[in-house]
Amino acid sequence: MWLKKKDNVLVLSGKDKGKKGEILKKTGDSKFLVAKINMVKKHQRSTGQEVGGIIQKELPVNQSKLALICPQCDSPTRVKISFLDNGEKSRVCRKCSARIE
């Protein structure tokens, strides 16, 4: 999957199906941390300066449950890889053939 940090994605399955979010970081080989997706509550003990209580945080989502949203056509799409004239790889939307930065 050709997903990168700051890409907008759509969740395809699970408890957050249909929600959109931005990728915050890549965790592991095929997991991504997406903003406000897969939220869980964690009971945190107070340690020194940090206040204890129940906090909410995101857990990683598998890449198979995410679809990239094209910035041009604003629809979830698969990514096609094409080569530029100088030999670099580029991500391209399969629906509208727009180049994705």
Image (tube, grey):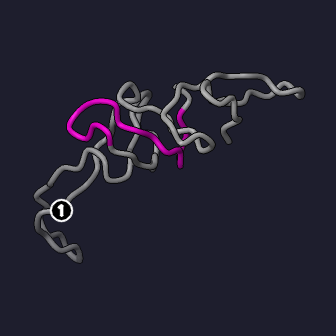
Q: Is residue 14 magenta?
A: yes
Residue 2 image offset from top left, x and y in percent = 56, 29
Residue 86 vs 42, above or below: the answer is above
Query: Residue drawn at (59%, 44%), measured in percent from left and top?
Result: 71
Residue 63 image offset from top left, x and y in percent = 41, 29
Query: Residue drawn at (12%, 63%), measured in percent from left and top?
Result: 54
Determine the main secondary structure of the stretch shown in magenta. Answer: loop
**Quarter of the rendering containing residue 12:** top left
In the picture, which quadrant includes the C terminus?
Answer: top right
Q: Is residue 9 magenta?
A: yes
The crowding category of the residue bearing disc 1, from other C-alpha atoms within 10 Å (few below 14, some 14 to 19, many at least 20), is few
**Quarter of the rendering containing residue 46:** bottom left
Give SS at disc 1: strand
At label 1, the amino acid type is Ile
In the image, 56: left or right of 99?
left
Give the camera-side residue of 99 and 60. 99
In the image, 57: left or right of 72?
left
- The range drawn in magenta is 3-18
The number of numbered discs placed on residues in the rendered structure image is 1
Query: Residue drawn at (28%, 50%), measured in percent from left and top?
Result: 58
Give the camera-side residue of 61 and 70. 70
Give the camera-side residue of 3 and 8. 8
Q: Which residue is mark 1?
A: 55
**Quarter of the rendering containing residue 94:** top right
Query: Residue drawn at (22%, 73%), measured in percent from left and top?
Result: 50
Residue 52 image offset from top left, x and y in percent = 13, 70
Residue 69 vs 79, above or below: the answer is below
In the image, 74: left or right of 64?
right
Residue 68 image offset from top left, x and y in percent = 50, 35
* Residue extending farthest bottom: 49
